[in-house]
Image: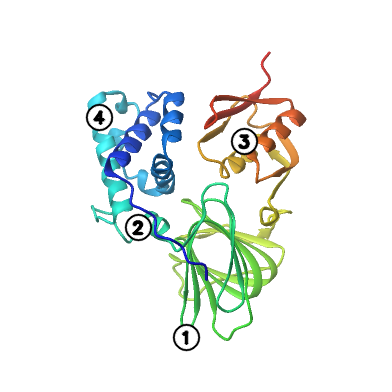
Amino acid sequence: MTHVAPTAPIARAVLAQAAHWHVELSCGGADPQALAAWLAESGEHARAWDLLRQMDGQMKSIPSSLALPALQASHLRRRAAAKLLAMLVATAGGIKLGQVGMESNAWQSWTAALRTAPGQRRRVLLADGGTLELNTDSAADVDYSAKRRLLRLHRGEIMIATAPDARPFLVDTVHGVIRALGTRFAVRCDAEASSVTVFEHAVEVRSHGHAAPGKSRRVEAGQQLRFTRLGDGGVMLAPRHQDSWTRGMLVATDWPLSRLVAELARYRRGHLACDARVARQSVTGTYRLDDIDAALESLCASHGLQVTYVTRFWGTVGPLAG
């Protein structure tokens, strides 16, 4: 198992700045160029902003009274920033404040033994001889015992090839548990749901909040299942090229442009958006994940688009200027 050096804590002042920027951006008062410059100043600034991205679900706990349009008032913006700062401090420092603390999924992501940054991929040899591959911006922990092999995916995307072993192999996400049945499969987890795609043999999936004890859904090779804590939407055929990221590629076939841009955005720091005027444009192509700027150039050249940059950290894919 690869040793991971501990990450230095983020200074409270930097967390406060990140909270301020997030609230200003939410209410439309942020200067994108100034925000991008702040992100570029230091790696600690980028880490604080990444932490905000990891707190998707917890950010929704900011009271609606502090949401738009009420955020236009400066004193309400300060209140929202203060609450967000408390959540950030709890997550980055382990201080339990209300619902947020060391048991939160964001905290577990931040302290996970296996992590990748945006744009990074990583391959790990497991103790039983199996392999684990982490895609961009992912966090996981491996917990093997005498009775079972458990992998906890806190966020992101992984590919697993299991090795023969009498102990059951389980993958746990915030939404449910996947039991491998001698297989190769991928799991993706975000704030809304988890999904599993099976490439060899089969898995069994059970949502954490399922009302019927012991009830699980079987997913065979070539199939995919998306599920939440409350259940799933049914097994479906897996889209082609779902494992292309393990080879450093992203393959799109008749995708809406907005979907492709959202996927490419996962592999780079900063902000990358799609102009609403071209969001539904159909896109087909193969793009290298190791060089997102080159991928964007290829996309624009082949589909008559352009990327407008405020700074290199802040870009929007849109139509060619008239």
Mark 4 and mark 1 in contact (Cβ < 8 Å)? no
Residue type at mark 3? Ser
Mark 1 or 4, nearer chain start = 4
> Depth-wise, is mark 3 or mark 2 nearer the camera?
2
Mark 4 or 3, nearer chain start = 4
Residue at x 49%, y 81% (from the top left corner): 148
Q: Image quarter for residue 135?
A: bottom right
Write down the residue under mark 3: 258
Check disc 3 and report its element: helix, strand or loop. helix
**Rendered location of residue 310, percent (x, y):** 52, 24
Mark 3 or 1, nearer chain start = 1
Residue type at mark 2? Ser
Check disc 2 and report its element: helix, strand or loop. loop
**Rendered location of residue 240, percent (x, y):** 74, 54
Residue type at mark 4? Leu
Write down the residue under mark 4: 76
Q: In this rendering, is residue 163 above or below 187?
A: below
Write down the residue under mark 2: 104
> Depth-wise, is mark 2 or mark 1 nearer the camera?
1
Q: Mark 3 Cα within 10 Å, few/some/many (few <14, many 20+)?
A: some
Lateral position of residue 30 relative to residue 265, left or right: left
Q: Mark 2 Cα within 10 Å, few/some/many (few <14, many 20+)?
A: some
Mark 3 or 2, nearer chain start = 2
